[in-house]
Amino acid sequence: MTAPDASNVHPIPEQPRVVLLKPLVSSPLIDIGEYTYYDDPEFAEQFETRNVLHHYGPDRLVIGKFCALATGVTFIMNGANHRMSGVSTYPFPIMGGAWAEHSDLVSDLPSRGDTVVGNDVWIGGNVTVMPGVRIGHGAVISTESVVTKDVPDYAVVGGNPARVLRERFTADEVRTLLNIAWWNWPLDLITAHIRTIADGSVADLAAVADTVRRHGGKG
């Protein structure tokens, strides 16, 4: 048996609510890794327009491989910012007419840069991710959280604003996992070791990685 087709938008038969995002999204400002999916019973195929908001550029949304995004996950991009240097925050120029002559008032707005989600990240339902946030590899974001600052690798966070609730592994184990970076393995190698990746310990996975290294990338 071979691995599932990463170019299949609907990987689960008779479940249109689950979509793989890499073959679905077309914006050059959105970069999504293979097998990252979004689950939504109504608007799964509209992820690019319904779940990535105020994306007028040039900031990018980067999401790694093998991430799981639940219904209602929303990424707020830097285009949502308003000028705060004067009395009013209202964006007059975008309404047109004579106001459009003051286009400089809606340019060079504050920006926190790209929003980056690592690999193997699980984001719960109705989570809001604010602009410029970086979410580490293997992190878990609890349902209804508002992520306003960077999330460490393999941390579990939750709340509004989201805070670290616990670490999934010890610091040494996290370093081991980041060094292994199983998500970058060849697909046939991932397929051969699915059970270890999904249900084994860090030591189990490290043993596989060591075997792979000793056999020149084959294990």
Image: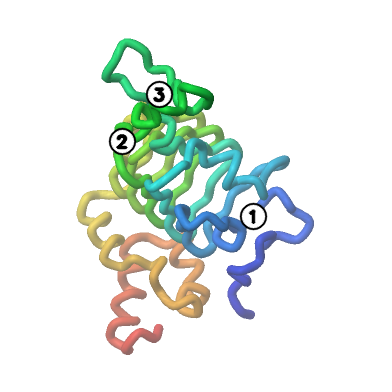
- Compare residues 202 and 116 and report the one nearer the observer: 116
Relative to 210, is 203 above or below?
above
Q: Which residue is mark 1?
A: 19
In the rendered structure, the answer to whether residue 195 lies left or right of residue 18 reads left
Q: For the image shown, how many numbered marks are present on the structure?
A: 3
Between marks 1 and 2, how big is the CA–CA gap? 35 Å
Closer to the eye: label 2 or 3: 2
Question: What's the residue type where badge 3 is placed?
Answer: Asn
Residue appearing at x 37%, y 53% in the figure: 118
Q: Which SS class for mark 3?
A: loop
The disc, 3 or 1, on the residue closer to the chain's N-terminal end is 1
Residue projecting furthest to the right: 14
What's the residue type where badge 1 is placed? Val
Residue located beneath label 3 in the image: 160
Q: Decide: few, some or many residues near mark 2? Use Cα within 10 Å; few <14, some 14-19, many ≥20.
A: few
Q: Is residue 139 visible?
A: yes
CB atoms of marks 1 and 2 within 8 Å = no
